[in-house]
Amino acid sequence: MATSSTSKRPVGADMHRARGVSLLEMLLVIALIAAISVLALAAMSGGREGMQLRSSTKQVASALRFTRTHAIATGQPQRFTLDPVKRTWTAPMGRNGDIPPNLSITFTGAREVQPRRGEGAIVFFPDGASTGGRVQLGARKAAWNIDVAWLTGEVKMKRAQGVR
C-alpha cells in the first residue's frame, strides 16, 4: 500500500498570503488628506483674515438691506450709521455690530446726513430710495465694496479692484 504524504493544509495555502491595509493605516491616510485639504483651503481663501473680511462684509450688507426694508415697511425714513473710529455700525430696532480691528474701513456718502464728524450714515426712504453711499472693508491686499444706489436703495457687494 502506497502511502501518500498528504498533509492537512488548506487548499491554496502555498500561495503567498494576501496583504491588506489595516484600519489604522487607512485612518492615518484619511487624517493626512483632511489636514492637507484644510491647509490648502485656508491658503486659497486668505485664511482667518479673509473669512473675517467676507463675514463682516455680509453682515454690514445685511444690516443695510434690513434698514431699507424697515423704511419701506414702516413708511418712515430709517438711518444706518457707521463709525470707523469705534469700528461699529447701527441699524434700526437696536441692531448693531462691530468690525474686527484688523480690517480697514472706508465710508463714502452724503455729508448732509452725517450724524457727527467722522461718522457715516445712509438714510433709506419709504419708497426704497436712499441717500446712497459706499462702505469698503479691506484686509491686506483684498477689499470688498458694499454699494448702496441712491435711486433704488439697492445694496450690492462686490470685490474691490486694484487694492494694494
Image (spheres, rainbow, N blue to C red):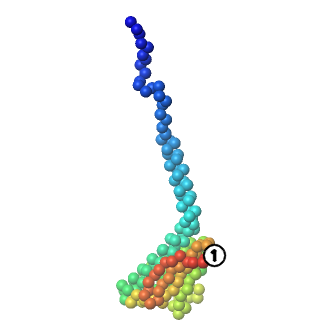
- Residue in view at x 55 percent, y 91 percent: 111
- Residue in view at x 56 percent, y 72 percent: 100
User: Residue 20, position in %: x, y?
Assistant: 48, 37
Q: Is residue 145 above or below residue 29?
A: below
User: Residue 129, position in %: x, y?
Assistant: 43, 89
Quarter-of-image position of residue 11: top left
Question: Is residue 124 at least partly visible in the picture?
Answer: no
* 100 lies left or right of 153: right
The residue lying toward the viewer, choosing from 95 and 60, is 60
User: Residue 91, position in %: x, y?
Assistant: 46, 81
- Residue in view at x 53 percent, y 93 percent: 112
The residue lying toward the viewer, choosing from 153 and 98, is 153
Which quadrant is the N terminus positioned in? top left
Q: Residue furthest right?
A: 164
Which three-letter amino acid code belongs to the residue tagged 1? Arg
Which quadrant is the C terminus positioned in? bottom right
Q: Residue furthest top?
A: 1
Quarter-of-image position of residue 116: bottom right
* 41 lies left or right of 130: right
The residue lying toward the viewer, choosing from 14 and 26, is 14
The residue lying toward the viewer, choosing from 85 and 1, is 1
Instruction: Identify the secondary structure beneath mark 1.
Output: loop
Q: Residue furthest bottom?
A: 112
Q: Is residue 47 above or below residue 155?
A: above
Reading the image, the residue beneath label 1 is: 164
